[in-house]
Amino acid sequence: MTARKKLLGEWMGRFSKVAMSGPEPNAAVLAELKMLRDRVPQSTGALVASGDGLLIAHDLPAHIEPDGMAALSASHLALSYRLSATANGGGFHEVVVRGTEGHVVIYAAGWASLTVLAGPEVNVGRLHLESRPVARAIVDHLAALATKPGKDRAVHTHRKE
């Protein structure tokens, strides 16, 4: 845990009676994100978030706040699951948001999500071709963490004072 995270947890505990402690990102998940960014031209960043919006790992540009983006990704993921279930009665795999300045693509990754950011000129087919296997690999990495107590845990915990 970085000194900054520790200080934030102490301040939150002091002022809100809730303290947060979060692990460092899992090295294997972070490596997947960095490789994805290298393999997709026009990719600008990626993150993995839990279904409840907690940041697991990120490789984002400095101007994007990772925790906020993780929360937004989880919200969009939840809406997408619900929309898919309501409209088709089936599961959800991915959603593409095409904006004027780029793309945001969110992939289901087990109990988490993979969010990939890319510029407006990205080849979306290539983005999917590279990102879908990464989402599956992240599922495997997170499942492996769940079976190794005390190791790089990907689950953030909250404790009350």
Image (cartoon, helix red, strand yellow):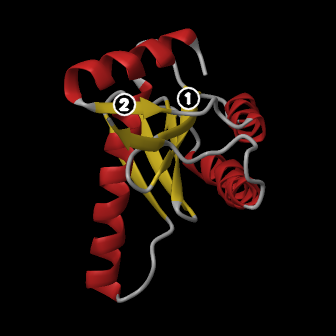
Residue 13 percent location from the top left of the image: 31, 25
For this rendering, which residue is in front, 24 or 71?
Answer: 24
Residue 79 percent location from the top left of the image: 28, 63
Q: Can you say which quadrant of the picture contains the N terminus?
A: top right
Image quadrant where residue 29 sits? top right
Q: Nearer the viewer, mark 2 or mark 1?
A: 2
Left or right side of 158 for 134: right
Q: Which residue is mark 2?
A: 19
Q: Which residue is mark 1?
A: 45
Which numbered disc, 2 or 1, marks the residue that appears first in the sequence?
2
The kind of secondary structure element at disc 1 is: strand
For this rendering, which residue is in front, 14 or 44?
Answer: 14
| Up-down relation of residue 18 to residue 92 (above or below) | above
Q: Residues within 10 Å of mark 1 (few under 14, many from 20)?
A: many
At a point 73% along the width and 45% down the height, the residue shown is 150
Image quadrant where residue 85 sits? bottom left
For this rendering, which residue is in front, 30 or 46?
Answer: 30
